[in-house]
Amino acid sequence: MDILPLLLNGFAIAFEPLNLALIIGGCAIGLFIGAMPGLGSVNGVAILLPMTFLVPPTGAIIFLGAIYYGAMYGGAISSIMLGIPGASTAVATTFDGRPMAIKGEADKALIAAATASFVGGSVGVVLFTLFAPPLADVALTFGAPEIFALMLMAFATFIGLGTDDIPKTIFSIFIGLVFGAVGLDIISGEPRLIFGDIPGFYHGINFLVLAIGIYGIGEMLWTIEISKGNAMMSKATISVPRILNTLVELTRTWRTMLMGSFLGYFVGILPAAGATPGSLMAYGVAKTFAKDPETYGKGNIKGVVAPEAANNAASTGAMLPMLTLGIPGSPTTAILLGGMVIWGLEPGPMVFTDHPDFVWGFIASLYVANLFALLINIAFIPAFIAVLKMPFTILAPIIFVLCIVGGFVPTLDMHDVWLMLIFGIVGYFMRKLDYPMAPAVLAIVLGPLAEPALRQSLLISGGSFAIFFTRPYAGVIMAIAIALFVLPLIKIALDKYRRPKDG
Amino acid sequence: MRMAELAMGVVMGVFSLYLMWKSTELPIGWIPGEGPGGGAWSFWLSTGMLLCCIAIVIRWAKRMTPQSRSTEVYMDSRGLKLFLLNAGALTAMIGLFHIIGAYGAIPAFLIFYLRFMGGHSWRLTGTFAAVTPVVTFLFFEIALQKTLPKGFTDPWFEPIFAFFY
Amino acid sequence: MKKVKISGRVGLLGLAIGLLTGLSVATVPGDAGAWEPKKPVEFIIMAGKGGGADKAVRYMQNIIAKHKLSSKPFTPINKPGGTGAEALIYVKGAKDPDHTIMFTLNSFYTTPLRQPKIKVDISKFTPIGRMAEDTFLLWVHKDSGITNVKQFVKAAKAKGNAWIMAGTGKNSEDNLLTDFLNKAYGLNMKYVPYKGGGRVAKELAGKNANSTVNNPSEQLGFYQAGKTVPIAAFTPARLPLFADAPTFKELGKDFVYFMQRTVVGAPGMSKEAATYYRQLFAQIYGSDEWQGYMTKKSLQGGFITGDILMRYWLREKAVHKVMLQKMGALK
């Protein structure tokens, strides 16, 4: 293979002083944008796009790629510190990251997230370098039936996320799916569930509105109540020995990291899937196959490592269909794609041969960006910890303001802010009654991917469900999904059989 | 707590019924040769929600969940007061966004929260109330070019924009 | 069937006017009394992120920034909800019409027709400038071995309603074209809607669909890679980029269809502001970058503005009304 000289040439481009400066600057900016609740990599890349005409195209995509990476690292920060996922890709990180922060292990969680992101990103970019063209062909053949099968698999991996109260868990999943259906039904072209004919519902219920409402406002109200209004966010400390201890502990999670990385990468390359299902599946798989599944959700470090490795690997993976097919694998890559057009490049199968400097400079810069994002992230951890030590009566109003502004900015619509407040308040009341909220938040992300895929498939097959089993990829994924659904049920049945129900 | 559990189950059940009714605006059945209609997904899922709510109420009646056995009060007076203060302040802030804009509402909220709820010094309160809007403006409006609502203060910002561009 | 003909015949005239206004603004920059935006301008997009309209707006935003054509930035805001209904409602009720403009597609006509509930009258909007008309072609996968419409019709007939035509949403432009093909050639193709033209193009390249009616910009990558081929064009004359694809006119079906790419101002925009935006977008239209973009994306049509643009809208609206009625999308 002649990849090596091309890659070395790419590194020469990435290490040009201007490009290196762009990588470092991009990582730092991305980190901050990603750490804000409500702002994720999509916003970062979209907003800074017009500024990239100042530099040559290769520098421009390197800069945006670095922002993308930085933001993916940053997403974990608000998940862990505030318990508010800044982007859908970071939802799974809250499951164990937040409990760790509450236990006073915020530093540990942040380092674990950064390290896992680094491993995930590295695995992703290596796979990218080695197998770009053949994987692109596989991704191309993925149609609606395969995507639906994949979504079903994602659902299967998170049935275990709820509490023991099964009706409440199912309720939560379903309400998330229904909210995800609000807006336009693309199959019939009709608007649906436009409550009270309010125009704000035409764009659907944004994932962020529900997530910030529930995790930002709802959880904050809950925290204020149980702490009687004068709690500290967490007792966080950081020191060199603690960092070293954490790193040693992390070496024991290598299996989880690699699992998350590979899984995330392969889900990420599929068009339309993106990093969110990848990170959920990684969490689900880590929990399902763990020896100690009951510690997940209570601050297990592997519960941070798995989704973080997966979402960074997936964001690298999502660039593959973008570069090789001209199809975005995620909203962020859609914007990057627009950027390439602006700079006069035609993404697609020809880009590797027509613009090798651009492609390989970009790929090499991902290696470099990954490293710098890690270093910058670790360097800032003490600063984040310091923020956590502020008295709660200062932190709470600042978080509220961040939530409101963060909920407004993505759509610039006050409708979403009001909706967020309603979700927050209702979420708070439900939270008090132990309704699990995470399934609803995940369902609102996956629902709008799953439902059209289901109906497109049935439209193609003329209403026959056989289409999900007769196509090779769809059939295999479907079989795995069904196995994942059945496995926990068998487990529960066995448990019940072994020790008869008490009371 | 016990009454709250029942009330939430019933309210959500009614909400599910509303969603089911709203879903029927589009066909909810099976269209031969095409698959489910546009309202089917949300209709049948809402039906599922309704069934869950019924299950929640049955479990409540049989006292199967910890909440339905709990004799604790759902919200004591202190909790209620805290909730009303926080949620009320938030609602007021969002409402003020429409009238005096983000740059009036944010300082007002911060002053209320820091000074009157947090009991912090005027110095600290003033610093936060002054710095937060400035940082917000520089970060969102200038760096990210995202315009926040300004209410009737909108024209006051024209000279500021003229200065920056 | 009745002959349906839509074309940008006024394009040339419009181009001349556009260039003249463009020149005139170039000679009087910074005129003391001239209106200019006092704050960032909201540039609403009737479609989602990453689509053709979105790319075009971000491209124009770049041209504005690069040549410093405006003292204030233009901030793109995507409002794709309800096939543009949300954008139309927003712009109709814009609080500051002088700082609100919108980039529109053909949903500018079809959405108010199909959703009378939203009560949008497009004749109230301020015409700024039509930046281009996007073209449509009929595409098939290269491996299908189909190279002309005759073979296409034969293959599609043989498969009946198992022949999958992918498109961008029910009752969208793609759906109109599919209906036309079905009627004109006695076919029974099944129309499967997807979200966005890029996704549609990919479904064809991945052989999950048998044919599409994509815009050139959406299929270009796959075309260059030798995965897909255009077999006919819905244009009055052959496109330079795809000279081998005949027009439907040549094939005896007089059917021409374009997608407008037009900048619209909010209703109630002041005269001064409208003049400013018209001159600005005429300048963008005349820039080397925009002209290059048009060539590369195989876009057609001249710059038209003012009353000519308004007449163009009303005519297009009437034409679309007839088309939608025919396909049964209007009650």
Image (tube, helix red, strand yellow):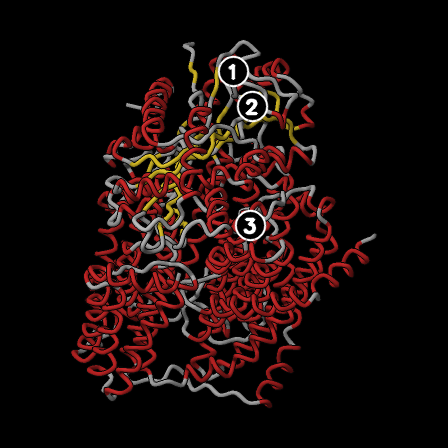
Q: Judging from the image, what secondary structure is the residue with disc 3 in? A: helix
Q: Amino acid at mark 1?
A: Leu
Pointer 1 with pointer 2, Cβ within 8 A: yes
Location of residue A125 (image quadrant)? bottom right
Q: What quarter of the picture does the C terminus of chain C occupy? A: top left
Residue A406 is situated, as x and y percent measured from the top left of the image, at 37, 63
The residue pinned by badge 3 equals A339
Q: Judging from the image, what secondary structure is the residue with disc 2 in? A: loop
Which tag, 1 or 2, sits closer to the chain's start? 2
Task: Identify which residue, C250 or C142, lies in the foreground.
Answer: C250
> Residue at the location (33% across, 77% down)?
B131
> Residue at the location (50% across, 24% down)?
C190
Residue A382 is situated, as x and y percent measured from the top left of the image, at 51, 84
For the residues labelled 2 and 3, the Cα–Cα distance comes to 35 Å
For the residues labelled 1 and 2, the Cα–Cα distance comes to 9 Å
Task: Identify which residue, C56 or A32, lies in the foreground.
Answer: C56
Residue A10 is situated, as x and y percent measured from the top left of the image, at 73, 59
Q: Amino acid at mark 2?
A: Trp
Residue B63 is situated, as x and y percent measured from the top left of the image, at 27, 66
**Crowding near pointer 2: few (<14 within 10 Å), some, many (20+)?**
many
For the residues labelled 3 and 1, the Cα–Cα distance comes to 40 Å
Q: In the rendered view, does A381 fall on the left or right side of A19?
A: left
Q: Is residue B126 above or below residue C142?
A: below
Q: Judging from the image, what secondary structure is the residue with disc 1 in? A: loop
Task: Identify which residue, A240 or C318, lies in the foreground.
Answer: C318
> Residue at the location (61% across, 63% down)?
A260
Q: What quarter of the picture does the N terminus of chain C occupy? A: top left
The residue pinned by badge 2 equals C163
Residue A292: which numbered mark, if any? none
The residue pinned by badge 1 equals C187
